[in-house]
Image (cartoon, rainbow, N blue to C red):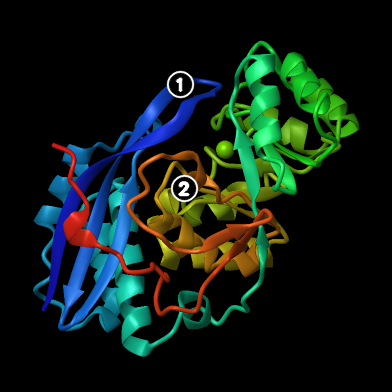
Amino acid sequence: MISITLKPYLLNKKHVFRIAGGARTNTPIVLVQLQFEHFVGYGEASMPPLYGETIASAVHFAKTFDFSPFESPLEIIKILTAVDNHACGNTAIKAAIDIALHDLIGKMVKKPLYQYFNLPKKDLKTSKTIGIDSSEIIKKRVEEAAEFHYLKIKLGGDNDEEIIKAVRNVTNKPLFIDANQGWTNKERALEKIDWLKEEGAIFIEQPMPRTAFTDMEWLLSRSSLPLIGDEGVQRLEDVKKAENFYHGVNIKLMKSTGLQEAFAMANLAKSLNLKIMLGCMSETSCAISAASHLGAMADWIDLDGNLAVTNDPFVGHKVNNGYIELNDNYGIGLIHPNWEKIKAYE
Ligand code: MG
């Protein structure tokens, strides 16, 4: 019999985080513990307000899901199908259950998750994200990110030029650019892309609104840099359509409903010759470590969500010189998780 325990939690940001479309200082999450016999697995739902889930909706979803028809976590495909059919949407809490199930299974079959997915263990260079801010703060954040090989720069506001100038005053590292749907004019977006190419950008994430389909088709054939869908590509179905609008997809566990579908999305993207980026929300080491196990499938890694928070309740992979280093513990690889000590948010 599988049993579930939940802990609502507020994950605090080290700094106010600004992107095109909003600013915040914390992220509501729900931590999930699944138990089966003497095995315990952990998962998490991270819910930035933009995506519409809340602690209340996640708790309701998890509490009303019935695990009793399932004999073992090894029936994962059946369980996750039932989870997905339990209600539409709710992708983050679905991901939490998926991650905890994979953690359980890894422990049961005595494999770290990358081995469970039959993937090689690779050292993964992650980018470090720099939010929208004043030139002075950006300069400081770029200096603090000295160990990282790539910076991910948030643009899409009124001061893109100023931000890039501030970054380039400190470093000439290659840049991931994320406009977060902030550019609304296609000709202007194209000009920005050409300029950013000159400035050392590698690709552009979500240049235009996710529903700007005809503009994105127009831009796709003209862009001098790869365009990556994030807000516009959430689940497997979206990958099928992505080649009409993007050169690649940003896969995140909180959008994909977890590892199983993220793995399928990456495989499909590969078969369609789409570039693969692995990304995250503001998450603890639980979900970030989980996603890192799929790292070998990605062209670009942006798994730094746990590095920008002050109260990560877990310890998982290490980050050394900008590289994510997975350990070989079974499952996700959380180190001595102390569930009892985690204080739930009320
Ligand atoms: Mg993005």
Q: Quadrant of residue 334?
A: bottom left
At which x and y percent is residue 170? 80, 28
Q: Amino acid at mark 1?
A: Ala
Q: Quadrant of residue 79?
A: bottom left
Residue at 73% across, 45% down:
150
The span from disc 1 to disc 2 (Cα, nearest Å) is: 18 Å
Q: Which mark is residue 306?
A: 2
Q: Earlier in the sequence, mark 1 or mark 2?
A: 1
- Given residues 231 and 108, the one toward you in this image is 108
What is the secondary structure assignment of the residue under circle 2?
helix
Q: x, y percentage for residue 165?
A: 80, 19
The residue pinned by badge 1 equals 23
What residue appears at the point 64 percent right and 30 percent down from the top-left corner? Answer: 141
Q: Is residue 188 left or right of residue 246?
A: right
Horizontal and vertical percent for residue 22? 46, 20
Relative to 4, is 131 above or below? Answer: above
From this viewpoint, which residue is outermost toward the top? Answer: 158
Of tags 1 and 2, which is closer to the observer? Answer: 2
Find ligand 1 in the image and state its quadrant. top right
In the image, taking residue 340 as reference, residue 278 lies left or right, namely right
Query: As displayed, is residue 184 above or below residue 320?
Result: above
Instruction: Tally the marks.
Output: 2
**Which quarter of the rendered picture does the N terminus lie within?**
bottom left
- Disc 1 under 8 Å from ligand 1? The reply is no
Q: Tell me which amino acid carries mark 2.
A: Asn
Q: Residue at x 50, y 20 (%)?
A: 21
Task: Answer with left or right where residue 68 lies relative to residue 220.
Answer: left
**292 or 224, nearer to the observer:** 292
**In-front residue for pair 190/125:** 125
Q: Report whether residue 332 is seen.
A: yes
Q: Secondary structure at mark 1?
A: strand
